Image: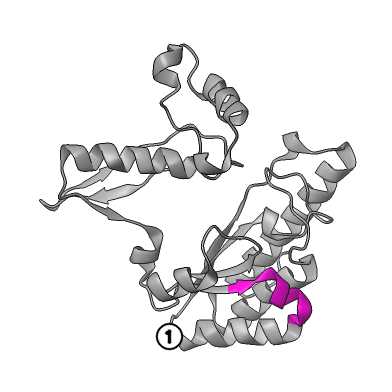
């Protein structure tokens, strides 16, 4: 991951890329054994006393990097995605199943609108209507659709770092892509966290890859506004 920092004198600094174990979140959520194994993979050759103090999870590494930057210059201002797109619900998350903080924290403090997987599964049509209505209410002229494959239920896509049950169905995700394309407009998209090497079986890897291709095709077609040949 590459946090972008805006310095107080008007310059910008990219802290560059970090090597991380993507399925981890925060060091506070890991056992000592998990952290020790991750440090051996991430910091080969670093002496044990020093390595034992180093973070291993993406969020913990980002926090450590920012702490060091603030130590050097306390006036540094970090710029994150939610700030770049503007708050007011313009960053919308669909398919959330768990969070370290309650939903109200993200919506009231950061203006991130969340639609949890449970409500999408309970009444898919109503959830689709609510999501599209919310996006329209923000006044945006186009949507960038970032699709984490683990937002889809593991029964359909388990070749990923964090396969979880009770996620979104492929039909729901595709219906959302199509409606956003028709009713708001897509300006682009991506597909994240597809990891065939982590598949439990060859069949599950093929199943996840096939769904990934379908998602990408649907996203491209919704962006172009026409079917691919």
Q: In which quarter of the image is the C terminus?
A: bottom right
Q: Which residue is drawn at 74% across and 53% down?
A: 164
Locate residue 46: give its quadrant.
top left
Locate residue 70: give its quadrant.
top left
Q: Residue at x 57, y 35 (%)?
A: 21
Q: Which residue is drawn at 74% across and 39% down?
A: 196
Badge 1 element: loop
Q: Is-magenta flag for residue 78?
A: no
Position above or below: 189 against 53: below
Q: In this view, does 1 lie to the left or right of 192?
A: left
Position above or below: 196 against 163: above
- 10 Å neighbourhood of mark 1: few (<14), some, or many (≥20)? few
Residue receiving disc 1: 139
- Highlighted magenta segment, given as a residue range: 115-124
In percent of width and height, residue 157 lies at 78, 52
Q: In this view, does 82 lie to the left or right of 205?
A: left
Position above or below: 27 against 217: above
Q: Residue at x 82, y 56 (%)?
A: 156
In percent of width and height, residue 99 lies at 57, 60
Q: Is residue 224 something that shows in the picture?
A: no
In percent of width and height, residue 223 lies at 58, 70
Q: In which quarter of the image is the N terminus?
A: top left
Q: Is-magenta flag for residue 117?
A: yes
Q: Is residue 215 something that shows in the picture?
A: yes
Q: Which of 151 and 171 is in front in this view?
A: 151
> What number of labels is visible?
1
């Amino acid at each position: 991951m590459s946090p972008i920092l805006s310095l107080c004198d008007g310059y910008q600094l990219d802290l560059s890329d970090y090597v991380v174990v993507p399925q981890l979140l925060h060091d506070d959520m890991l056992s000592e054994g998990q952290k020790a194994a991750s440090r051996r993979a991430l910091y080969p050759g670093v002496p044990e006393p020093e390595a034992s103090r180093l973070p291993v999870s993406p969020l913990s590494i980002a926090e450590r990097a920012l702490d060091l930057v603030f130590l050097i210059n306390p006036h540094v201002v970090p710029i994150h995605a939610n700030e770049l797109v503007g708050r007011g619900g313009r960053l919308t998350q669909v398919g959330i199943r768990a969070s370290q903080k309650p939903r109200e924290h993200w919506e009231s403090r950061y203006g991130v609108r969340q639609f949890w997987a449970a409500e999408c599964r309970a009444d898919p049509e109503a959830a689709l209507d609510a999501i599209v209505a919310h996006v329209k209410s923000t006044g945006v002229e186009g949507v960038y659709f970032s699709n984490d494959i683990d937002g889809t239920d593991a029964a359909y896509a388990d070749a990923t770092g964090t396969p979880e049950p009770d996620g979104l169905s492929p039909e729901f995700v595709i219906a959302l892509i199509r409606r956003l394309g028709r009713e708001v407009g897509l300006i682009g998209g991506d597909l994240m966290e597809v990891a065939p090497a982590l598949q439990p079986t060859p069949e599950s890897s093929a199943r996840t890859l096939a769904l990934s291709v379908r998602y990408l095709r649907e996203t491209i077609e919704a962006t172009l506004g026409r079917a691919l040949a």
